[in-house]
DNA sequence: CTGAATCCTGCGGGATACTG
DNA sequence: CAGTATCCCGCAGGATTCAG
């Protein structure tokens, strides 16, 4: 039996494994968790404080998914109160470089994006201004 | 007045511009659109067929956002029936490399991720198996 | 053919309270 | 402290229809 799905190279197909893996890391929070853990082991509460805007629930979900996919290691210390430490696995560490490339790109092209956005938004403001002008004239 | 937000380097802050730009490209569809347009100019319908699983609505939304942020150029030919062509802008083309790095990573670590997932999932199956075993024994 | 508009549903995701 | 459980709401996003 051919392992067709295993080696499916067509990223545009929904059943492509590469694409399914890609979706795992291309979301709002996973990159931020990687950025955080890149600096070293962190506890749940530390991550919660460090990553501004993430909720308890989303952090748990994200960490669980990353753990399941072998990106982070979760270590529980059986003490009271509980201590849980998260760190990148060797596999997770291989993601640092490509994920960081995104951060670098984002930072390096801030102005261009901002400028494009302004230009685009002004495109629709002009008709509005004309409309207002015509409304004013009608008085 | 300090332009604090403009140069905010702390990716972990929600008001960090880098992070806001990062979110633009770290979603389910944007990378796929880039992969598609990387091969050249495409029409709306072509993209729709090419990117398996994307809906008309999501493709429109994604393309609009990318256009607004200066990543893609949209050209409308005033003919009937309408022809609209999408292509990467120079800015969008600078994203090809980092975005492709993700695809390469995904493809290169398929097995590792799959293996980690299997291991993780089996971790919870064992208690179930034991439970079943005990149920069987009770008969 | 390319979309905008409308409708409608599921579930993403927040807030809160509870457990180990 | 680190989560799970519950409740609940808003909107993401699919299906469909209409327009240019």
Image (cartoon, coloured by chain):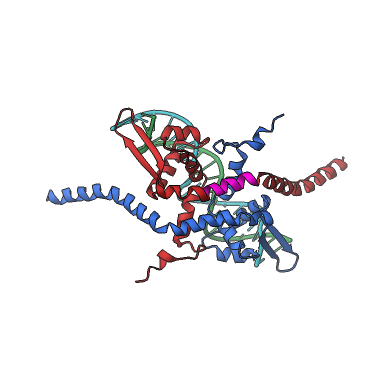
Chain colours: A red, B blue, C cyan, D green
Residue for point 59% across, 46% down: A104
- Given residues B111 and A3, the one toward you in this image is B111
Q: Does A38 sit above or below residue B59?
A: above
Q: Does B21 sit above or below residue B3?
A: below
- Given residues A77 and C5, the one toward you in this image is A77
Residue for point 50% across, 34% down: A50
In the picture, measured across the screen, residue A45 lies left or right of residue A78, that is right
From the top left corner, tell me how far across and down residue A99 is, in percent. 52, 48
From the top left corner, tell me how far across and down residue B69 is, in percent. 66, 49
- Given residues A75 and B48, the one toward you in this image is A75
Range drawn in magenta: A99-108
Residue for point 50% across, 43% down: A29
In magenta segment, residue A101:
yes
- Residue B30 visible, this angle: no
From the top left corner, tell me how far across and down residue A55 is, in percent. 48, 36
* Residue that protrudes farthest toward the bottom in the picture: A1
């Amino acid at each position: 039996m051919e392992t067709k799905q295993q080696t499916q190279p067509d990223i545009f197909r929904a059943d492509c494994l590469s694409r399914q893996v890609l979706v795992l890391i291309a979301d709002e929070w996973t990159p931020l968790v990687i950025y955080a853990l890149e600096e070293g082991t962190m506890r749940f509460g530390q991550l919660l404080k460090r990553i501004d805007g993430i909720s308890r629930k989303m952090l748990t979900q994200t960490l669980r998914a990353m753990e399941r996919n072998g990106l982070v290691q979760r270590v529980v210390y059986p003490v009271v109160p509980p201590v849980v430490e998260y760190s990148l696995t060797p596999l997770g560490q291989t993601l640092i470089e490509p994920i960081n490339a995104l951060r670098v790109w984002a930072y390096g092209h801030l102005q261009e994006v901002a400028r494009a956005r302004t230009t685009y938004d002004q495109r629709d403001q002009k008709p509005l201004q004309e409309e207002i002008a015509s409304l004013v004239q009608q008085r």
